[in-house]
Amino acid sequence: MNTVSLLISAVIQVLLFSFIPFIFWLFTSRKQDNFFVWLGLTRPNIRNKVELLWLYICFVVVGCLMIIFLLPILSNSPELATSQFAAQGSSAIIPAIIYSFLQTGLSEEILFRGFINKRLCSRFGFTIANLSQAILFGSLHAIMLSSINGRFEMRMIGVVLLTGGIGWVLGWISQKKAGGSIIPGWLFHASSNLLISLFAMY
């Protein structure tokens, strides 16, 4: 596995997932807010740190177990994105960190929780916004897995519900537990992906 090419790919993905939000901000909110504040890339405002820590532990453990055991069944495919690290041991740790924290964790949190959820929240309120971004998040994962399988099956609805449920929790953490910051959700998301990658590596 080429770490440099993975890093370049991850940076490109973060930039691509940031491009639409940046253009939108440029034309709508440039005079009101700093781009990073507008996107939620700010220091989290956490009222109860112990509660958030327990949420973190539960989310990472339960989320990983569901993805490891349920997603291959629902998608009718053992191929997950983390299978690229299968049986590579400690040589894949740096690539797995890049994949988890940049390529998926940061880019997806910027697009779904930082851009889509926040913009919809300002127009329609939290309930509609969070549900909408979660459905989009789940649908994207179902589409990606369908492309691996070569067709869309009814069981993909289970993939939408599973990954969409995870997306809903990440949006709820950002908006309700972190004062609008996407950083805790990014750490939750990235930690889960890293743990799943480690599971594949060993």
Image: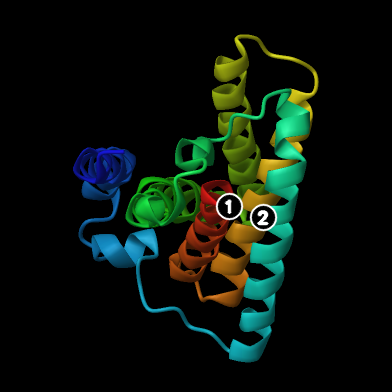
Q: Position of residue 59 (x, y in %)?
A: 68, 65
In this rendering, position of residue 19 left or right of residue 96 = left
Kind of residue indicated by mark 2: Cys
Name the residue at the top extreme: 151
Q: Is residue 181 above or below residue 23?
A: below
Location of the N terminus (image quadrant)? top left
* Label located before the other in sequence (1 or 2): 2
- The one nearer the camera, 104 or 180, is 104
- The one nearer the camera, 155 or 2, is 2
Count of labels in the image: 2
- Tell me the residue that label 1 is attached to: 196
- Tell me the residue that label 2 is attached to: 64
Q: Is residue 116 visible?
A: yes
Q: Position of residue 131 (x, y in %)?
A: 68, 47
In this rendering, position of residue 82 left or right of residue 170 = left
SS at circle 2: helix
Q: Residues within 10 Å of mark 1 (few under 14, many from 20)?
A: many
**Residue displayed at 46% across by 52% down:** 89
Q: Quadrant of residue 156?
A: top right
**Residue displayed at 69% across by 46% down:** 68
Q: Residues within 10 Å of mark 2 (few under 14, many from 20)?
A: many
Mark 1–mark 2 CB contact (< 8 Å):
yes
User: Which colour assignment does the render follow?
Assistant: rainbow
Q: Is residue 159 above or below residue 183?
A: above
SS at circle 1: helix
Kind of residue indicated by mark 1: Ile
